[in-house]
Amino acid sequence: MYYGEILIRLAIAVFAGGIIGYEREYKNRPAGLRTHILVCIGACVISLIQVNMN
């Protein structure tokens, strides 16, 4: 897996987490933008590690 592909996947994770987090902050619910971005990045990194282990 190339570095460009890894960066694209991480950017997509940040974008998806940002959309979800922004919507939750807009409705004044807990776990907003930063939390969802961090969770999505963590899930992306774990899945990238699992793909590269095989």
Image (spheres, helix red, strand yellow):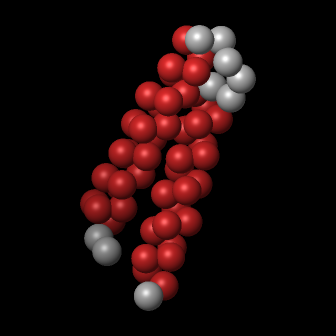
Residue drawn where x is 58% and y is 21% of the image: 24
Picture quarter with the C terminus: bottom left
Residue drawn where x is 60% and y is 43% of the image: 38
Residue drawn where x is 48% and y is 85% of the image: 53
Picture quarter with the N terminus: bottom left
Q: Is residue 41 above or below residue 45?
A: above
Residue drawn where x is 55% and y is 11% of the image: 26
Tell me residue 18's x, y (percent).
Answer: 47, 31
Q: Is residue 8 above or below residue 28?
A: below
**How many numbered marks are there?**
0
Tell me residue 13's x, y (percent).
Answer: 43, 46
Tell me residue 8's x, y (percent).
Answer: 31, 52
Quadrant of the rendered image containing residue 5:
bottom left
Quadrant of the rendered image containing residue 9:
bottom left
Q: Is residue 14 left or right of residue 37?
A: left
| Outermost residue, top side | 27
